[in-house]
Image (spheres, helix red, strand yellow):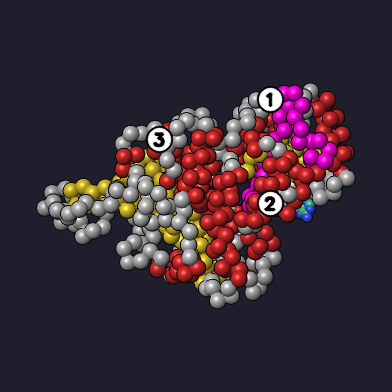
Amino acid sequence: MNSQIIVIFGASGDLTKRKLMPSLYWLYKHNRLNASFALLGIGRTPYTDETYREFIEKQLPLFAAPTELDAISVSNFLQHIFYYSMDPADKEAYAELKARLKMLDQQISNPGNYLYYLATPPSLYGVIPKYLQNVGLNIEIGEQTRRIIVEKPFGYHLSSAQELNYIYNSVFREDQIYRIDHFLGKETVQNILALRFANGIFEPLWNRNYIDHVEVTAVENLGIEERGGFYDKSGALRDMVQNHLIQLVALTAMEPPALFNADSFRNEVVKVYQALKPLTNEQIKSQVIRGQYTTAHSEAHIIKGYREEKNVDPLSRTETFVATKLYIDNWRWGGVPFFIRTGKQMPTKVTEIIIHFKPTPHSLFKGMAGNSSLNSMIIRIQPNEGIVLKFGLKVPGSNFEIKQVSMDFTYDRLGGSPVGDAYAKLLEDCMLGESTLFTRSDAVEASWKYFDPILALWENDPCMPLYGYPAGTWGPLEADNIMGTDYAWTNPCKNLTNTDLYCEL
Ligand SMILES: NC(=O)C1=CN([C@@H]2O[C@H](COP(=O)(O)OP(=O)(O)OC[C@H]3O[C@@H](n4cnc5c(N)ncnc54)[C@H](OP(=O)(O)O)[C@@H]3O)[C@@H](O)[C@H]2O)C=CC1
Ligand SMILES: O=C1O[C@H](COP(=O)(O)O)[C@@H](O)[C@H](O)[C@H]1O
C-alpha cells in the first residue's frame, strides 16, 4: 500500500463518524494501511487537529466493537488524523488547501498521493472536483496517484447523473473515479460471484430453462432516523433500488466475465442494465408499487409514521417502500420475473436473494403440491450471511410423502482472515487502485435510464398511488398484486437470530 493522504470532505458528518472512521481504524489496527498514512478531515466546523481528534475519539467506541479497541492503538491512530476548516463550496479556499496538503506531505513524507472522499451532501458532488482542478489538485505528476471516491446518490435522475459524469470525466480519468456502492463491499455479495463462477454445478441451471423466478429483498426494521432532510428529497427508489438492489440483480444475472478484472466484470454488469426491459406508463402503474409507513400502535409503544419524522414534510409523498417486477430481455433470462423490494420500518432487517427453480414436470409423490417448486436457493446477505439450498425428501416411514428440507452453509464457518465492514473493504481497494467493486460511469447511466421514467411519472402525475402501510408490517398489500396468483413474497421470520439462517414462518 502506497503512502497517501485521505482527504475527507464532510468530515464532521454522519457517514464519516459512523462508517469511515471505524473502517479506517479497523484497517489501521489490522496493519492494512501504510505506516505513514494521514487523514485530512475537511469541513466548515471550526475544529483544530486536536479538537477533531477528540471528536473522533468520542465516536469510535460507539461504532467499533469494544474488543477491537485498545487505548494504545486508538491513540496512535489519532496521531495520523488532521483537520482543515474550510467551506468546500468556496472556490477561493482551495489554494490554501493545496498549501496545507503540501505541508502535510513534508510532515509524513508523502510524495503527493491523495485520495479524496466526498462525504458531503450530494449538492457538492459537482462542485468539489472542479475546484480541485482549478488548483491542479487533480493532476498526477510522475508516479503520484490522485483518486476520488464519490458517495451515492450519483445524480438525482439520468440527466443529472450524465452531468456529473461529464464533470468527473473532464477532471479525472475514469480509473481515478470510484463511485461507491457499499453493498458491493459486503462479503456475501462478492460471494455470489464465487458461488456462480467457482462451481460447475450451479451455472448449468442458472437460466430461464431451470429458474422460475427470482426475489431480491433488502428491508430494514428502522425508520429514517436523523436523515429526514436527506431522505425526504430522495425516497426509497433513489436511496436503495437504483443502486444497491439493481447491483444485486446484476450480480445474480450477469454472464461470467472472461477475466476477473475491473473492466471484464463491469462490462457484464452494464450489459444486464442495458437488457432491462423498459416499462410503459401502464406497467409502471401496475408493476411498481410505492408505499409510505404510517403510525403503528402496539401494546408497548407507538411507532411514528413517516410524515411525523423530523425534517419530513407533513404532507410528504416520498416513498419509504418500493416493490417491483422487472425482466431482463436476453437469452439467459427472457421471461423470468425478478421481484425486488425494499422498505423502511418493516418487521425485520434482512437482505437476501432467493432463486426459485422450476418444479418437476410431473408430481409423482404425495405432498408435492401441483406445480409449485420445492427447490430454491436463498443467498442471505445479512444479517446472518449464508446460503440455503431447499429440496424435497421423503418423510421417514411415511408412504412416500415428500417434505421440503434445507441444506445450509453459514458464512462464519468459512474462517479466513478477519473481515472488516464493507467500507473497509472498499476503502482498501481504492487505496490499492482496484476498481472492480466500484460503479463505472456507463453503469450508473444505464441504471438511471431504466428508473428515470418511473420517477418522472411519480413526480408528474399526481394521481399515481402512494400506499400507506403500518410501520412494522411487510408493506402495502398492493405489493402482493404484482406477484399475481402464481407467486408470493417469501417473508423471513421476524426474529432472525444469528443461529437461524432461515426459519419457517
Ligand atoms: N450517512 C449514511 O449512512 C450514508 C450517507 N451516504 C451519503 O454520504 C454523504 C454524506 O452523508 P452524511 O454524512 O449523512 O451527510 P451529513 O448531512 O451528515 O453531511 C456531511 C457534512 O457535510 C457538511 N455540509 C453539510 N451541508 C453543507 C453545505 N451546504 N455546504 C458545505 N458543507 C456542508 C457538514 O459539515 P460542516 O458543517 O462541518 O461543513 C456535514 O457534517 C451523502 O451524500 C449521503 O447521501 C451514503 C450512504 C450512507
Ligand atoms: O445506502 C444506504 O444503505 C442503508 C442500508 O445499508 P445496510 O448496509 O445497513 O444494509 C440504508 O439504511 C440507507 O437508507 C441507504 O442510504
Quarter of the image holding residue 302?
Answer: bottom right
Check disc 1 and report its element: helix, strand or loop.
loop
**Which residue position is annotated with label 1?**
2
Q: Which of 200 and 319 is in front in this view?
A: 200
Mark pair 2, 1: CA separation: 32 Å
Tell me which amino acid carries mark 3.
Answer: Phe
The magenta stretch spans residue 369: no
Examine the rendered structure and indicate whether residue 200 appears above or below residue 340.
Answer: above
The residue drawn where x is 37% and y is 52% is 334
The magenta stretch spans residue 145: yes
Residue 111 rendering spot, x and y as whole percentages: 77, 24
Residue 197: assigned label: 3
- Farthest residue in the bottom direction? 463
Check disc 2 and report its element: helix, strand or loop.
helix
The residue drawn where x is 63% and y is 60% is 234
Tell me which amino acid carries mark 1.
Answer: Asn
Please tell me how crowded label 1 is: few (under 14), some (14-19), or many (20+) other residues with Cα within 10 Å. some
Q: Nearer the viewer, residue 75 or 343?
A: 343
Q: Is residue 254 visible?
A: yes
Residue 163: assigned label: 2
Tell me which amino acid carries mark 2.
Answer: Glu
Please tell me how crowded label 3 is: few (under 14), some (14-19), or many (20+) other residues with Cα within 10 Å. some
